[in-house]
Image (spheres, rainbow, N blue to C red):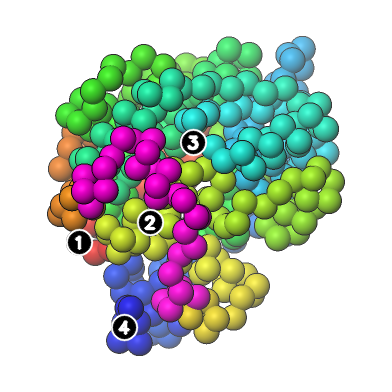
Amino acid sequence: MIKYKELKICTRCIYDERTPAISYDEQGVCNYCKMVDNLKAEYNTGMPEGEQKIDEIIEQIKRDGKGKNYDCIIGVSGGTDSSYMVYWALKKGLRPLAVHYDNTWNTSIATENIRKVLEKLKVDLFTHVIDNREADDIFKAFFISGVPEIEASTDLALAETMYRAAAKFKVKYVLEGHSFVAEGITPLGKNYFDGKYIKSIHKMFGKLPMKTYPLMTFWKFIKWTTIYRIKKIRPLWYIQYNKEDARTFLEKEFGWQYYGGHHLENRMTSFFHSIYCPQKYNIDYRNNSLSASVRAGKMNRDEAVIEYYERPPYIEPELLSYFKKRLNLSDDEYEKIMKTPPKYWYEFPTYKKRFERLRPFFYLLMKVNLVPRSFYMKYCFPAEMNRL
């Protein structure tokens, strides 16, 4: 059990001194809380000015989408935010195409959630399904390598799949269902991934060739953002959004089903959050959402501290045995790998230095919404890596 009472913890949220690049003011409030405040002020989140701004963006999306089958792309996972984003877009008069990257580790609940919402709303679905053996080979390569980003291939593949769908249907906008108010700010530090990183890890530790995996290389990323000029918009950064209310609405309106916790709609994601990071790296990403709940006044800070420091993450029954079976790992092999010293992204080839050198270029892309602010902040500045 962590002796958290000996740690310096933010007086407003629950980020402690082990958090990468953290600092505190004289009142003990951390820089990540201030980052949230600055984002809310910049985007006028939940204010009339924020609502007006996103309405202006929506009108532009409609104008640019005239004569096309779809005017925007929305990535769907079966989770709360992406499911609600599809409904919200339709309510605003948009014509979205739902896009899903299937890494073959989805729970049946997530799959059914996607079907229920899209069928009732009559929204088309574009899906890229990777060969399950290839998916498992990539996941196993990351597990053997000893780096934390075991599910990075999924996040990057979804982004690439959305870009491909946008290009195929000549759509200029991707709407992402992310809310920094509801989900918090992920501290900048040792967690990182890009296409070169995924390719290098797989080349070193994988066995099967990448044939069906949609790898996003640096030049593909440049193509999508500068030649096709596909913009990423995060509407939840502008509007008043309550995840709990959205979940209740989805359950009532679509028969949507909750999957038990944040990021638990996919078994690999669930393994990453509930077993892999807490047990191998002593990282528990619940502090992001718990801190967000405290900042938003939805949860008492003392309750959040107890939840985070005294109660272990929820582990889905049979999750570990499912992981071992899918990756063909014996108990001894699994334990041996889990006990090897951790390694991190900066020990492998990546595009990181290239992104940093091109920071002014990506700043311009960020200002016109061709890359998200979160990308600019994480990829284009040197990361502080001496703490977790």
Residue count near mark 4 (Cα–Cα under 10 Å), binned few <14, some 14–19, many ≥20: few
Q: Is there a contact, CB below 8 Å, between mark 3 and mark 2?
A: no
Residue 386: image tag: 1
Q: Mark 1: which amino acid? A: Asn
Query: Helix, strand or loop at disc 3?
Result: loop
Name which quarter of the figure residue 188 lies in.
bottom left
Residue of label 2: 275
Compared to residue 287, the image places residue 81 above or below, namely above
x, y percentage for residue 102? 52, 29
Horizontal side of 147 relative to 319 (left or right) equals left
Residue 105: image tag: 3
Q: CA distance from mark 3 to mark 4?
A: 35 Å
Q: Mark 2: which amino acid? A: Ile
Residue of label 4: 3
**In the image, what residue occupies the spot 35% across and 87% down?**
5
Name the one closer to the observer, 102 or 326.
Answer: 326
Query: Helix, strand or loop at disc 1?
Result: loop
Q: CA distance from mark 1 to mark 2?
A: 23 Å
Compared to residue 166, the image places residue 34 above or below, namely below
Single out the mark in the foreground, 4 or 2: 2
Single out the mark in the foreground, 3 or 1: 3
Residue count near mark 1 (Cα–Cα under 10 Å), binned few <14, some 14–19, many ≥20: few
Query: Helix, strand or loop at disc 2?
Result: helix
Task: Confirm whether the magenta stretch covers residue 321.
Answer: yes
Q: Mark 3: which amino acid? A: Trp
Q: CA distance from mark 4 to mark 2?
A: 20 Å
User: Which residue range is magenta in the image?
Assistant: 307-335
Name the one closer to the observer, 50 or 269.
Answer: 269
